[in-house]
Image: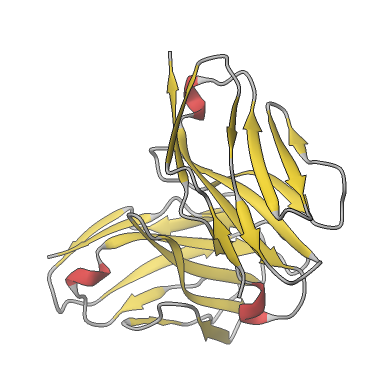
Amino acid sequence: NAGVTQTPKFQVLKTGQSMTLQCAQDMNHEYMSWYRQDPGMGLRLIHYSVGAGITDQGEVPNGYNVSRSTTEDFPLRLLSAAPSQTSVYFCASRGRIQETQYFGPGTRLLVL
Amino acid sequence: AQTVTQSQPEMSVQEAETVTLSCTYDTSESDYYLFWYKQPPSRQMILVIRQEAYKQQNATENRFSVNFQKAAKSFSLKISDSQLGDAAMYFCAYRSARGAGNNRKLIWGLGTSLAVNP
């Protein structure tokens, strides 16, 4: 199993550009989440999904969209990037009866 | 609302020595899970150890063990025989065992940066 994979590893955007951060897992996990990590602020939940077709907002959802058309994939979309979205983004997944979350390697995003 | 506090932003330990990282949490629930995650410079988040609140026995994983004090709402991580590869940011996290959706999200501490000196 590859576990949780994220692409790209690093991205530079200009303000106003859009992009999609990809996340995939091959563990058949129902639950998937997106976090952002900023210095001094720990991990903050952006959006999460409890299954295909079901998504919900976390703590800091503004400026981000998600969809979950399959169990495996959970892309995060930035429609109009802003410098405040410069961060490291982590995707995570876990099974319905599991309590342990598995993280992807992260995507470093720089918005100029 | 639940909160997780890590009161030590930075710590250091000599190689081969033992170090304890502190974590306290606030909750009114009785059924929950606690985690320690490690984040090395590679930024990958790696699960170190997990504790179920209903278990009185402290969890242990090789050189890593916890001191879980439920009444005191304390969940410290002890690293024995510290190695250079243990240098990382360590995060404590809490999850409720009840409810659904947002009620069961992970609540994170701000982390403790551990340096291991040769």
Give the side of residue B29 with respect to residue A14, left or right: right
Image quarter hosting the C terminus of chain B: top left
Q: Between residues A81 and B19, which one lies in front from this camera angle?
A: B19
Q: Between residues B84 and B26, which one lies in front from this camera angle?
A: B26
Q: Residue at x 86, y 57 (%)?
A: B54
Q: Residue at x 38, y 38 (%)?
A: B41
Asked if residue B116 is positioned above or below residue A9 in the image, the reply reads above
Q: Quadrant of residue A13?
A: bottom left
Q: Residue at x 51, y 63 (%)?
A: A24
Image quarter hosting the N terminus of chain B: bottom right
- Tell me, yes or no, if residue A35 can be seen here: yes
Residue lying furthest front: B72
Q: Between residues A24 and B51, which one lies in front from this camera angle?
A: B51
Residue A19 image offset from top left, x and y in percent: 27, 73
Give the side of residue B55 with respect to residue A97, left or right: right
- Tell me, yes or no, if residue A51 can be seen here: no
Residue B62 image offset from top left, x and y in percent: 72, 28
